[in-house]
Each structure stands twice: as structure tokens, then as C-alpha cells.
Amino acid sequence: MAYEAALSAGDTAQMDSWFAADSRTIRFGIGEEHWGADAIRRWRHSASPVPPGRLLSETRVDLWADDLAVVTTLFTYPSSSAVGRQSQTWLRTPPGWRIVHAHVSERV
């Protein structure tokens, strides 16, 4: 939920901190893909903030191992009829839980 709060607030420093600082970290967005934490960071700092009113539903947190979790959720915005889908793979690292893979898509 802290990542979601940062996303809604447009807090790029916080959003960056939730992704693993690793060249293997990947984020697939609705219209783009980013290979490595540096690419994610560069994109995040130039991207528009998410529209206001993002609403999550059907959120699941599935722990697959002591150090590996997958988080999935649907999201909507008041200004759109599209349903967004988001999945994140989280890995427990020395600094704490971090996203190592994320995928965002829309169902229109």
C-alpha cells in the first residue's frame, strides 16, 4: 500500500525505492517496457502521474516462498471505462521487500 500511496502522490523517489536496484529488474507498462532499474527510474521521472481517483480491487498477495511474493490487482479510474491489471513480483532483499518484475496492462 505504501507503493500505491507513492504512485498516487507522484512521489518518484518513493516509487524508485520500491523497485530493486538491479539490472535484472523489469517493468512492462501499458505502452512501454523498461529493462533494468536505471531504465525504470529514467522513465518514471519523465512520465505523467497517474490520473486522480485510481481505485484498486481484487488485490491478492500470494506468498510463494519465504522471500518471494506475487501481488496482483485490478484498477480503474473515474474518467475511464477501461480496467487496468497490475502484477508485481516482490523479492525479499537485504534492504527489504522490493519489486523485481512488474506488468501493467489494460482491458478495454
Image (spheres, grey):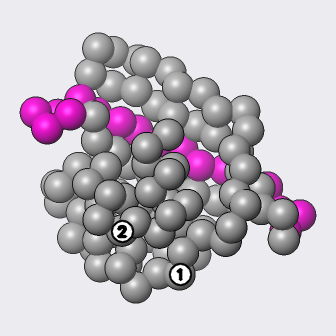
- For marks 1 and 2, the one nearer the N-term is 2
Badge 2: how crowded within 10 Å, few (<14), some, or many (20+)? some
Q: Are marks 1 and 2 in contact (CB under 8 Å)?
A: no
- Helix, strand or loop under label 1: loop
Q: Residue at x 44, y 57 (%)?
A: 6
Decide if residue 84 is in sight here: no
Magenta residue check for 81: yes
- Helix, strand or loop under label 2: helix
The label number, if any, that marks residue 60 in the structure image: none
Q: Amino acid at mark 1?
A: Ser
Outermost residue, bottom direction? Answer: 46
Outermost residue, right direction? Answer: 81
Image quadrant where one finds the C terminus: bottom right
Instruction: From the top left corner, tell me how far across and down residue 23 is, in percent.
Output: 17, 60
Disc 1 and disc 2: Cα gap in Å? Answer: 11 Å
Badge 1: how crowded within 10 Å, few (<14), some, or many (20+)? few
Q: Residue at x 51, y 49 (%)?
A: 4
Instruction: From the top left corner, tell me how far across and down residue 2 is, in percent.
Output: 43, 44
For the residue pair 96 and 26, the one nearer the viewer reads as 96
Callout count:
2
Q: Main secondary structure of the magenta part?
A: strand
Q: Report the residue marked by disc 1.
A: 48
Q: Horizontally, is 87 left or right of 106 in the view?
A: left
Point out the stretch of residues depicted in magenta: 80-96
Q: Amino acid at mark 2?
A: Thr
Quarter assignment of residue 14: bottom left
The label number, if any, that marks residue 12 in the structure image: 2
Instruction: From the top left corner, tell me how far across and down residue 59 is, in percent.
Output: 64, 33
Instruction: From the top left corner, tell me how far across and down residue 86 is, in percent.
Output: 59, 49
State whether residue 106 is above or below residue 66.
Answer: below
